């Protein structure tokens, strides 16, 4: 009996498969829940504050307004299950908000928020590639002075090393490809805006070659996923990423048994239902 094929692929799932096929299986096929993390939820908060800021007319995008949007986003977040599950005490919650405030300060240091007018914020785009559907969320889409599309993706983690940067730029081609498919127009540029320490903007210019390269790469990964599903063969690949992997309990590299993962999910779903 083969594993069921996932119906869509996103940039993060593509990189999960490249990093470790077994982690991909746990996440995309077994759909094991992954505990929320402080950096991820903090990223959600900053994305939401910026979304609220850019939804207002350019003259209203002041630093004070950003602070108000952050406060509103933080209030929204208080009932979000991912935030609640972090179970932060008051000191940790204060530090969490202070970090988010610092990221907004960094944003204002690297971009003038009145210099553009978005045509889309937090846009979910999806398009077919062969018998597969690719999907991704674009943080911000705007038109430049020449009427060309510009995609912006906020990154709330550290600026990547040179090698990691190459893999992030693979994600950039993914966004460019989605825009081309959905809007019939390739973005003139895709910018990754790093709001962590050493804030900066990394700009990529998609080309025919880079887009076709993305299609080939995704098709090859999809073939590998199909093969692994057919053979029920998703192998662990140990790396430094194991330190943050929430699937160690079921990973043979850590003494776990992958065959117990679906049963664990079933038991968790029953516990929630009862
Ligand atoms: S612990 Fe490491 S090897 Fe095991 S599934 Fe997670 S990333 Fe893969």
Image: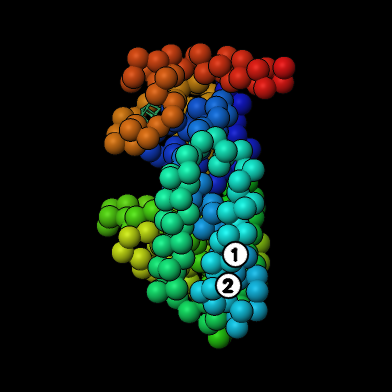
Outermost residue, right direction?
274
In front of the other: 192 or 172:
192
Outermost residue, front direction?
90
Image check: 44 left or right of 121? left
The quarter in which the C terminus is drawn is top right
Q: How crowded is mark 2: few (under 14 residues within 10 Å), some or many (20 or more)?
A: some
Kindly identify the residue that appears in the image at 52 percent across and 18 percent down: 261
| Residue contact at pointers 1 and 2, CB within 8 angstroms | yes
The residue pinned by badge 2 equals: 65
Above-or-below relation of 265 to 66 = above
Kindly identify the residue that appears in the image at 64 percent across and 55 percent down: 124
Where is residue 33? Give x, y as percent.
55, 30
Kindly identify the residue that appears in the image at 34 percent across and 32 percent down: 242
The residue pinned by badge 1 equals: 69
In front of the other: 187 or 210:
187
Where is residue 220? Give x, y as percent.
46, 42
Q: Can residue 58 be seen in this view?
A: yes
Above-or-below relation of 235 to 117 = above
In front of the other: 218 or 239:
239
Residue 236 falls in which quadrant of the image?
Answer: top left
Q: How is the image coloured?
A: rainbow
Q: How crowded is mark 1: few (under 14 residues within 10 Å), some or many (20 or more)?
A: some
Kindly identify the residue that appears in the image at 34 percent across and 36 percent down: 241
Q: Is mark 2 on a helix, strand or loop?
A: helix
Where is residue 71? Give x, y as percent.
58, 60
In front of the other: 52 or 21:
52
Q: Is mark 1 on a helix, strand or loop?
A: helix
Where is residue 179? Give x, y as percent.
59, 63
């Amino acid at each position: 009996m083969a594993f069921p094929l996932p119906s869509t692929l996103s940039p993060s799932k593509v990189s999960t498969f490249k990093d470790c096929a077994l982690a991909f299986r746990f996440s995309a096929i077994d759909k094991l829940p992954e505990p929320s993390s402080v950096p991820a939820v903090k990223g959600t908060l900053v994305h939401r504050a910026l979304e609220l800021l850019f939804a207002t007319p350019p003259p209203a995008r002041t630093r004070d307004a950003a602070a108000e949007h952050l406060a509103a986003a933080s209030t929204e977040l208080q009932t979000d299950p991912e935030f609640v599950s972090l179970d932060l005490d008051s000191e940790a919650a204060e530090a969490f908000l202070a970090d988010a405030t610092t990221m907004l300060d960094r944003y204002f240091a690297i971009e003038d928020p009145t210099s553009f007018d978005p045509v889309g914020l937090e846009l979910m785009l999806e398009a077919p590639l062969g018998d597969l559907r690719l999907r991704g969320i674009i943080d911000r889409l705007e038109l430049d002075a020449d009427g060309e599309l510009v995609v912006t993706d906020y990154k709330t983690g550290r600026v990547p090393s040179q090698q990691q940067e190459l893999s992030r730029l693979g994600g950039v081609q993914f966004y460019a490809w989605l825009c081309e498919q959905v809007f019939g127009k390739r973005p003139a540029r895709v910018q990754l805006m790093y709001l962590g320490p050493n804030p900066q903007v990394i700009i990529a210019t998609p080309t025919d070659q880079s887009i076709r390269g993305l299609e080939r790469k995704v098709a090859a990964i999809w073939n590998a996923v199909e093969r692994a599903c057919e053979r029920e063969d998703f192998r662990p690949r140990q790396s430094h990423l194991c330190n943050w992997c929430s699937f160690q309990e079921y990973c043979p590299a850590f003494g776990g048994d992958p065959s117990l993962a679906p049963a664990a999910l079933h038991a968790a779903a029953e516990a929630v239902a009862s």
